[in-house]
Amino acid sequence: MKIKNKAKRVFHNLSYFLFLRKINRVNAGSLISKIVVVVTLVFLGFGAAAQKLEVDSTRVMHIDEEKAEVKHSPTKATIYSAILPGLGQAYNKKYWKIPLVYAGLGTIGYFVHWNNDNYKVMKLAYRDFTDTDPNTNSYLDLNGAQYYDLENSETDKANFKTNLTRQQDYYRRNRDLLIISFVGFYGLNIIDASVDAHFFDFDISEDLTMNWQPTMSSFNNVPLYGVNLSFTF
């Protein structure tokens, strides 16, 4: 009877031990599964973050490349100066040229106006002098008219008429040449803006140097002298 009870206890303890071992195995397996899941999620999270960072970096690099590709436009500088003199120079950041542009155009424009006014005066004086209306005598207001005897001397009349014709031609020619000069200077303003824009991104390296040294060689026992030039970029 005692032996049977001992056998039952041993069997009971063994069964309990096996049951605990089984539970531990289940718990261990569940714990390992949880660890695997957590590690996987963390790995996927870092992978997604890294992928996003890589995408963002690529996007930033792409934007930077696009910005780098946007260069100074000679076309814009040309159009700007064609629309408004000096605007292309402002686009090229050559602000010191703007007063020169307007000084040149203003000076030429002033003399165009001055010569045109004098041409009109001479033209009116010639017309008044050659008509038969005694009331139209604007030519008498001209400087030097008092030195001509326009009432009695036919010679003075002829000389005065010739002088009026020459003065008309003189002022008209100057006016026309100055108009051409104005257009040329306007075009020069456009060309200057275009050329400056082409050289806007031109990099002049500080390492650009030129070295020279005298050299001597001989040909058929005849000494030859020269200079050796070397450029460093």
Image (cartoon, grey):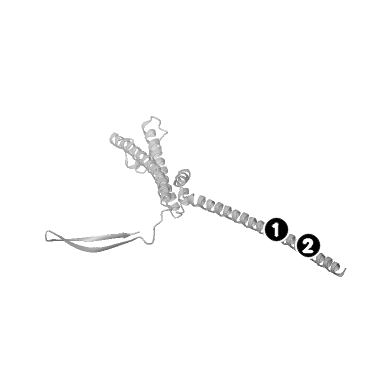
Rendered location of residue 7, percent (x, y): 82, 67
Residue at figure coordinates x 45%, y 50% from the top left:
89
> How busy is the neighbourhood of tag 2: few (under 14 within 10 Å), some, or many (20 plus)?
few
**CA–CA distance in space, label 1 to label 2:** 21 Å
Residue 196, placed above or below residue 233: above
Residue 158, placed above or below residue 1: above
Residue 19 shows which numbered tag?
A: 2
Rendered location of residue 146, percent (x, y): 35, 42
In which quadrant of the rendered image does the N terminus lie? bottom right
Of residues 52 and 173, the one drawn nearer to the viewer in this rendering: 52
Rendered location of residue 172, percent (x, y): 36, 38
Could you tell me which secondary element the residue under label 1 belongs to?
helix
Mark 1 / mark 2, whichever is N-terminal: 2
Residue at figure coordinates x 38%, y 41% from the top left:
180
In the image, 185: left or right of 3?
Answer: left
Give the image quarter of residue 166.
top left
> How busy is the neighbourhood of tag 1: few (under 14 within 10 Å), some, or many (20 plus)?
few
Q: Residue furthest left?
A: 221
Q: Pointers 1 and 2 in contact (CB under 8 A)?
A: no
Mark 1 vs mark 2: give the one in front: 2
Rendered location of residue 13, percent (x, y): 81, 66
Of residues 226 and 107, the one drawn nearer to the viewer in this rendering: 226
In the image, 122: left or right of 23?
Answer: left
Residue 33 shows which numbered tag?
A: 1
Which amino acid type is shown beneath numbered disc 1?
Ser
Of residues 126 and 96, the one drawn nearer to the viewer in this rendering: 96
Which amino acid type is shown beneath numbered disc 2?
Phe
Q: Residue furthest right?
A: 1
